[in-house]
Protein backbone atom coordinates (compact mmCIF):
# COMPACT_ATOMS: atom_id res chain seq x y z
CA UNK A 1 0.00 0.00 0.00
CA UNK A 2 2.85 2.46 0.64
CA UNK A 3 3.71 2.59 -3.04
CA UNK A 4 0.15 3.76 -3.85
CA UNK A 5 -0.03 6.35 -1.03
CA UNK A 6 0.81 10.00 -1.57
CA UNK A 7 1.21 13.00 0.69
CA UNK A 8 0.27 16.26 -1.00
CA UNK A 9 1.41 19.62 0.37
CA UNK A 10 -0.69 22.72 -0.28
CA UNK A 11 -0.36 26.13 1.36
CA UNK A 12 -3.36 28.40 1.90
CA UNK A 13 -3.49 32.07 2.85
CA UNK A 14 -5.83 31.74 5.83
CA UNK A 15 -7.79 29.33 8.00
CA UNK A 16 -11.06 29.81 6.14
CA UNK A 17 -9.70 28.86 2.72
CA UNK A 18 -7.49 26.10 4.18
CA UNK A 19 -10.36 24.46 6.03
CA UNK A 20 -12.67 24.88 3.04
CA UNK A 21 -10.25 23.12 0.71
CA UNK A 22 -9.59 20.38 3.30
CA UNK A 23 -13.28 19.74 3.91
CA UNK A 24 -14.06 19.56 0.19
CA UNK A 25 -11.23 17.11 -0.50
CA UNK A 26 -12.30 14.75 2.29
CA UNK A 27 -16.03 15.12 1.60
CA UNK A 28 -15.46 14.34 -2.10
CA UNK A 29 -13.24 11.29 -1.30
CA UNK A 30 -10.21 12.87 -2.95
CA UNK A 31 -8.33 12.54 0.34
CA UNK A 32 -8.62 10.33 3.39
CA UNK A 33 -7.31 13.00 5.73
CA UNK A 34 -6.04 16.57 5.66
CA UNK A 35 -4.02 18.10 8.49
CA UNK A 36 -4.43 21.88 8.59
CA UNK A 37 -1.27 23.27 10.19
CA UNK A 38 -1.46 26.96 11.16
CA UNK A 39 1.39 29.37 11.66
CA UNK A 40 3.53 28.71 8.60
CA UNK A 41 5.70 31.71 7.79
CA UNK A 42 6.63 31.65 4.11
CA UNK A 43 9.36 33.62 2.36
CA UNK A 44 9.20 33.38 -1.40
CA UNK A 45 9.94 35.20 -4.63
CA UNK A 46 6.89 36.39 -6.57
CA UNK A 47 6.98 38.54 -9.70
CA UNK A 48 10.58 39.61 -9.07
CA UNK A 49 10.17 40.59 -5.41
CA UNK A 50 10.86 38.74 -2.18
CA UNK A 51 7.60 38.38 -0.25
CA UNK A 52 6.74 37.13 3.24
CA UNK A 53 3.46 36.03 4.69
CA UNK A 54 1.63 33.81 7.14
CA UNK A 55 -0.02 30.75 5.65
CA UNK A 56 -1.66 27.46 6.58
CA UNK A 57 -0.10 24.18 5.44
CA UNK A 58 -2.39 21.41 4.27
CA UNK A 59 -0.86 17.94 4.61
CA UNK A 60 -3.11 15.75 2.48
CA UNK A 61 -3.09 11.95 2.49
CA UNK A 62 -4.46 10.25 -0.59
CA UNK A 63 -3.89 7.57 -3.21
CA UNK A 64 -1.71 7.96 -6.28
CA UNK A 65 -4.65 7.46 -8.62
CA UNK A 66 -6.56 10.35 -6.97
CA UNK A 67 -3.77 12.94 -7.36
CA UNK A 68 -4.83 14.37 -10.73
CA UNK A 69 -8.43 14.88 -9.60
CA UNK A 70 -7.24 16.25 -6.25
CA UNK A 71 -4.95 18.78 -7.95
CA UNK A 72 -7.74 19.86 -10.29
CA UNK A 73 -10.08 20.41 -7.34
CA UNK A 74 -7.46 22.37 -5.37
CA UNK A 75 -6.92 24.63 -8.39
CA UNK A 76 -10.69 25.23 -8.61
CA UNK A 77 -11.04 26.10 -4.91
CA UNK A 78 -7.78 27.92 -4.20
CA UNK A 79 -7.61 31.73 -4.08
CA UNK A 80 -3.96 31.92 -5.23
CA UNK A 81 -3.10 32.50 -8.87
CA UNK A 82 -0.43 29.76 -8.64
CA UNK A 83 -1.13 27.51 -5.64
CA UNK A 84 1.48 25.13 -4.28
CA UNK A 85 0.58 21.50 -4.97
CA UNK A 86 3.48 19.14 -4.27
CA UNK A 87 2.93 15.38 -4.46
CA UNK A 88 5.30 13.25 -2.37
CA UNK A 89 5.70 9.48 -2.56
CA UNK A 90 5.43 7.45 0.64
CA UNK A 91 8.19 4.89 1.19
CA UNK A 92 6.55 3.10 4.12
CA UNK A 93 4.39 3.42 7.19
CA UNK A 94 1.83 1.75 9.41
CA UNK A 95 0.15 -0.80 7.13
CA UNK A 96 -3.23 -0.36 8.83
CA UNK A 97 -3.03 3.41 8.28
CA UNK A 98 -2.00 3.01 4.64
CA UNK A 99 -4.90 0.60 4.10
CA UNK A 100 -7.25 3.15 5.68
CA UNK A 101 -5.97 5.90 3.36
CA UNK A 102 -6.61 3.63 0.38
CA UNK A 103 -10.17 2.82 1.53
CA UNK A 104 -11.14 6.40 2.33
CA UNK A 105 -9.74 7.94 -0.88
CA UNK A 106 -12.04 6.01 -3.22
Image: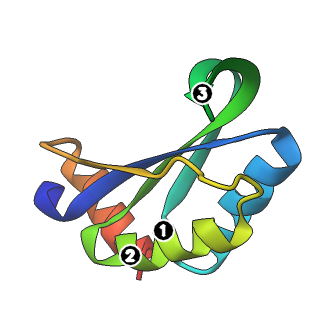
Q: Quadrant location of the N terminus?
A: bottom left
Element carrying mark 2: helix
Q: Quadrant of residue 43?
A: top right
Q: Residue at x 42, y 74 (%)?
A: 105
Task: Please name whichever residue, 106 or 15, is drawn nearer the observer in this view of the structure.
Answer: 15
Q: Earlier in the sequence, mark 2 or mark 3?
A: 3
- Looking at the image, residue 91 sits to the left or right of residue 71; the answer is left
The residue that disc 2 covers is 68
The circle drawn on residue 48 is 3
Q: Is residue 41 above or below residue 84?
A: above
Q: Earlier in the sequence, mark 3 or mark 1?
A: 3
Query: Crowding at label 3, few (<14), some or many (≥20) Cα neighbours within 10 Å?
Result: few
Q: Which residue is mark 1?
A: 71
Q: Position of residue 26 (x, y in %)?
A: 60, 68
Residue 82 spot, x, y in % from top left: 60, 53
Q: Is residue 12 left or right of residue 11?
A: right
Q: Is residue 24 left or right of residue 89?
A: right
Q: Secondary structure at mark 3?
A: loop
Single out the mark in the foreground, 3 or 1. 3
**Residue at the location (16% across, 54% down)?**
2
Check disc 1 and report its element: helix, strand or loop: helix
Counting from the top left corner in percent of width and height, residue 7 is at 36, 49
Amino acid sequence: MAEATRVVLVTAPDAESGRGIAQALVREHLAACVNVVPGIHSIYRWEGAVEEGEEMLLVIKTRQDRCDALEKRVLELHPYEVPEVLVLSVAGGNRDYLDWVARESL
